[in-house]
């Protein structure tokens, strides 16, 4: 099993450009999450999904959109990138309907917006 | 509402000495607590969790954590630190009474553990 994979690993954008980050998991998990990690801020939840076709806002959703068209994939979109979105983005997944299940994280995408 | 605090940004310990990384939490109901480790340029990896039962939980790489309900703490410990333990450690909590029933965990800000040779 590959676990949770993220594409791309690195990306540099100019202000105003758009891009999509792809997260894929092969563990048949229902729940998927997008986080951003900034120095001194820990992990902040952007959006999450509790199943195929569903999405919900997390702590810092502004400037991002997501889609979960297939159970195994969770896409994070930046429509018009801003320097404040420079960060490391992590995707995670977990089993459904259980508060005691741990999360599985991808390796991260390092995004720089100039 | 659920919250978690890691009061130390950085913990320094000499190799071979015991280590403790602190975590305190606040929940409405019963807490479900997790520790994750992040090595440089990697994603987070699950270490251990407390659900119920024994207050001392054993996990990966020789780590253990002690749940203390009266002090609302879940400190991560290891009897003898290794240089290779140097990493960023995150505590997370889930509350079974979380609003919406979606059980989204809340993470602490992380503690950088540095083990000196």
Image (cartoon, coloured by chain):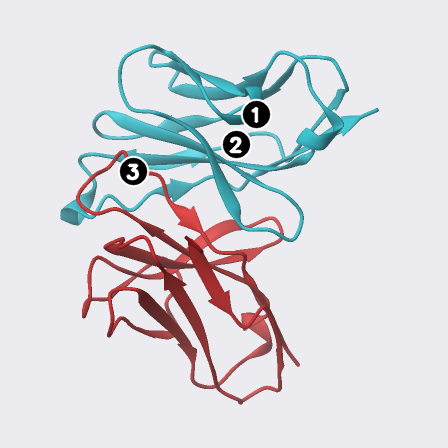
Chain colours: A red, B cyan
**Foreground label between 3 and 1:** 1
Circle 1 marks a residue in which chain? B
Q: Which residue is the site of mark 3?
A: A101
Left or right of residue A50, residue B82 in this image: right
Residue situated in front as seen by the camera: B1 or B82: B82
Residue A31 is marked as none
Question: For numbered disc 3, what is the local secondary structure?
Answer: loop
Is the residue B51 above or below the residue A42 in the image?
above
* C-alpha gap between disc 1 and disc 2: 21 Å
Q: Quadrant of residue A107?
A: bottom right
What is the spatial separation of the Cα atoms under label 3 and label 1, in whole angstroms? 20 Å
Residue furthest to the right in view is B117
Residue extending furthest toward the front: A1
Which of the two marks, 1 or 2, is nearer to us in this view?
1
> Real-space Cα distance between discs 3 and 2?
21 Å
State the mark number for residue B61.
Answer: 1
Decide if residue A79 is on the left or right side of residue B95.
right
Secondary structure beneath label 2: loop
Taking depth in this image into account, of A25 and B114 the one nearest to the observer is: A25
Which quarter of the figure is the C terminus of chain B placed in? top right
Check the image and report above or below for A31 versus B67. Answer: below
Dot 2 corresponds to which residue?
B6
Q: Residue at x 24, y 74 (%)?
A: A69
* Residue in view at x 60 percent, y 51 percent: B42
């Amino acid at each position: 099993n590959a676990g949770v994979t993220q594409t791309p690993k690195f990306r540099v954008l100019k202000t105003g450009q758009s891009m999509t980050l792809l997260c894929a998991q092969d563990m048949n998990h229902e729940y998927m999450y997008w986080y951003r990690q900034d120095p001194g801020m820990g992990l902040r939840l952007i959006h999450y999904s509790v199943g195929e076709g569903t999405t919900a806002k997390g702590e810092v959703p502004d400037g991002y959109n997501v889609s979960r068209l297939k159970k195994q994939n969770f896409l994070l979109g930046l429509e018009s990138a801003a320097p404040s979105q420079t960060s490391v983005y992590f995707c995670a997944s977990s089993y459904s309907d259980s508060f005691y299940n741990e999360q599985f994280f991808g390796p991260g995408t390092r995004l720089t917006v100039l | 509402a659920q919250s978690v605090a890691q009061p130390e940004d950085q913990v320094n310990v000499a190799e071979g000495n015991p280590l403790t990384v602190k975590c305190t939490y606040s929940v409405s109901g019963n807490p479900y607590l997790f520790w994750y480790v992040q090595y440089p340029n990697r994603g987070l990896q699950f270490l251990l969790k407390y659900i119920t039962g024994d207050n001392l939980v054993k996990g990966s790489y020789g780590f253990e954590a002690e749940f203390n309900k009266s002090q609302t703490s879940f400190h991560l410990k290891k009897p003898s630190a290794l240089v290779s333990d140097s990493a960023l450690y995150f505590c997370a909590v889930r509350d079974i009474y979380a609003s919406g029933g979606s059980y989204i965990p809340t993470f602490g800000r992380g503690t950088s553990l540095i083990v000196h040779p």
